[in-house]
Image (spheres, rainbow, N blue to C red):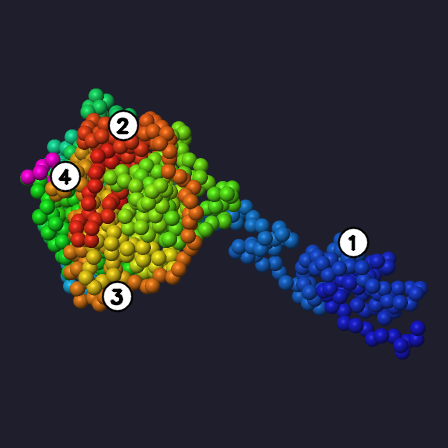
Amino acid sequence: MSEHRRKPPQPQGGGRAAARRGQSGASSGRRAAPRGATGSPADYGLGHGSGSEEQPTGSRADARRTSQRNPGGGRRRAADPAAGRRGGQTGPGQGRGRSAPDRKRLIDYPRADKYGWQRWMPSWKLVAGLFVGFIGSLVAVAGIGYAMVGIPDVAKTATAQNNVYYWKDGSQMVATGGETNRQNVDLSQIPEEMRWAVISQENKTFYDDSGIDPKGIARAVFNMARGGQTQGGSTITQQYVKNAMLNDQSQTISRKFKEIFVSIKVGAEVDKDQIMAGYLNSAYYGRNAYGIQAAARAYFNKDAIKLDPGECAFLAAMLKGATYYDPAGATSVDSVGATPAANSRRALRQMQDTLDKMVEYGHLDASVRAKYTTLPKWQNPRSNTDLKGQIGYLVDLANGYLVTHSKETGVTPDLLQQGGFSIYTTFDKNKVNELQASVKKVQDANIKPEQRPDTDTHVQFGGASVEPDTGAIRAIYGGEDATKHFTDNADQTGAQVGSTFKPFVLAAAMTWGVRDPDLGSSQAQDERTIVSPKSLFSGQNKLKIRNYDHSIWKNEKGEEWLQTNDGNVSVGDAPDFKIDLREAMRESVNSAFVQLGMDVGLDKVKDSAVSAGLKESSLTNSGFPSFSIGISDPSAIRMAGAYATFAASGKQRDPYSVEKVTSEKGQIFTHEAQTKQAFTAKVADNVTDVLKTVVDKGTGTNAQLPGREVAGKTGTTDGNKSAWFVGYTPQLSTAVTMFRYDDDESKKDRTFLKMFGTGGQKKIHGASFPAQIWHDYMLEALKGTPSKDFPEPQPIGEVINAEPSPTPTPSATESAEEETSPSPTPSKTAVEPSPSATETCNKFFGCANDGGTSNGNGNGNGNGGTGETSPSPTTSETPGDNRGNTGGGFFGGPAG
């Protein structure tokens, strides 16, 4: 090759190019040429023989590793692989750049002397250093935190401001809450059993621990970090500190850490007996009582030093939350779980557990413990005279709503106790006064306990009025006086609702329909026939109840069910006594609705009631035919709300009692209505149309309002132990209940009493006193409100059972067999407490009452309870012959 065609020499630098040239040279068996080479083909890595350029065999990664192994020249110097193999000699061209010296980093991360993934693995020195630094930081923070916090003065705790409650129109109802009941006593004035009761139940290592529970703290912090509710301190020391920090109840992690530091300091510097005295003097026991002395007075009207071991264990249970342990119960529109009965069970169980632990830990002798097996006798919880009359019930209802819905309202029990809130309620002052006046009018005129002590004592009334368009509770009647009768009869009674439950059966039949008796059970659930109010069912007394497939219903013992009507009369034309559902509702015929419920399915009946607005927890077992005629015990508030769903053409809104809440921080809560379409307008309007018939010319004629359309239903329960009237106009829905109930809260078992002869009447029906109260109240409550008609119902469903009845009238032989067969005793799935000695009856299926004769002398005896007979349009409801119709309990059906 001639000289003039030779390529000019290329700059010889370090780095990848040099590495490639060196590798190319090495692969051809030659040494890498120095930079001063003459420019022969070998100088440029050209092979011999072929005359073509030879591709380098090394990679960039190889070059990079080569460069790293010879760091002096960096990217300006290419290492000679051959020279490296000979001991690290470098080519002459490397002198063009000065070699950079190695520089050590404070933290060698990523690691310079490692490659690939190993560069990102920290060394043990780094890990150890970080750990030591972290522990040191924690110690420093803890030391600073410990130094900065002080020991709280418990004497300055438990101060409270008033909460101010307002009527619907914005005028003030009452200011209450600031009258904190608090009195400190020395530890010597606190029974030793009280101290050991708290220690045994809450913190058995109190005298030995450091004052904190690390596991409990971690759990509380984790819960708050997730956005959940904070948890109380696990030790008595932590609870004492929490009580002493009432001025700071913010639910934050920083506040929790502050509480931890204070607890550590208190545990280290304060005597344990002083902590115990401070805790018992600052703890909240319910009933607005702070401290053991106030609690002893609030529950037992005695000084703390006089408390016996049982009372001490009882008060220790109150520390877990009086809302669910005070035997008097708690009042709230949704406080189903805080009834007097439920609270009494919880309190007794907790009290007994505390006493057992005191014995186990050696703090109480077993022979002493054996004396305290029942709840101690406690007194009525009311003391504030500002809460007399209906005011106390209204305040309780508002407070219960706020606390029950604390996630929405932001008002916790602790914050409510501190006070400072302005609470604007839904209650209409005029309506509350009118409802109270209507009850008092009937009560004063008819209930004479002095004249009729056997029948007119313990008579109670309850009522509630709900606005269909909003769900706002406009009025309640909770009892004669909130300072004398604590249980709110509008919100929690336990009284069965009887035939006022029947509209939910009709709504279920119009929503889901009846099952086809010719199909299998699974297919029948899918293929149903929507029911028209014109559908025909048997009104026969002592009707043999059948399953939807026409097989005879039997309990697990093989016993049949015969459904009775009020007065043991059949309704309809013989021989099959067919009547349509409108007439059956108007005359409150039990047999027709029990069979309808079986054909639809009791599960669907239950769904219908819940959809309308009843709480599922207030509904009893739906596995028995009498479920359809009201053996459940929803509150008056919930019944008024459920009927309001029909008034609002199927739109369901939960009853509520608070519109908004403000504090010094501004408005913190505003109610937002949540509407659900429980039923179609067609279903709801047809139910209303049928219920209009009840008031126009059925059992509810006493509730007629001049110039207004009214829909409603009467209800009288089996044994005549409660009576109801629930009715509505388009603007207002109201439920009124009456019952006899021994309200001595100190009794272990409180029972409903029969009302035969009460008020001078042979028998109390829903059409008598309840309907009269409803009428008088609604007449005044709707004054000035324009009359409004219900929507015109659209045709719905098919006429069922138009052909001859599949359940023919029993033959004389069959009837005789029924009447002489033994009285059935079904499962005790929904059993009430055993009857008293005076009630010699079958608690499940019926009994003869008060010396009366048994109806049917066997299976027909009270199986379905009683129904209501239709009064004439101008007279009160005809009681009918009630002999033998008081049986049933949970399984005997209520009256209409």
Q: Is 453 covered by the magenta stretch? A: yes
Task: Establish if 640 lies above or below 44.
Answer: above
Secondary structure beneath label 4: loop
- Identify which residue is drawn at 8% across, 48% down: 444
Q: Residue furthest left?
A: 450
Mark 3 or mark 4, which is nearer the start of the sequence? 4
Counting from the top left corner in percent of width and height, residue 32 is at: 81, 62
Counting from the top left corner in percent of width and height, residue 675 is at: 35, 60
Q: Tell me the kind of residue under disc 3.
A: Lys
- Give the camera-side residue of 703 and 651: 703
* Residue that mark 1 sits on: 86
- Identify which residue is drawn at 15% across, 34% down: 377
**Label 3: how many residues lie within 10 Å, few (<14), some (14-19) or many (20+)?**
few
Mark 1 or mark 4, which is nearer the start of the sequence? 1
Secondary structure character of the magenta stretch overall: helix
Secondary structure beneath label 1: loop
CB atoms at circles 4 and 1 under 8 Å apart?
no
Q: Which residues are magenta?
A: 451-456
Mark 4 or mark 2, which is nearer the start of the sequence? 2
**Label 1: how many residues lie within 10 Å, few (<14), some (14-19) or many (20+)?**
few
Mark 1 or mark 2, which is nearer the start of the sequence? 1
Label of residue 356 in the image: 2
Label of residue 757 in the image: 4
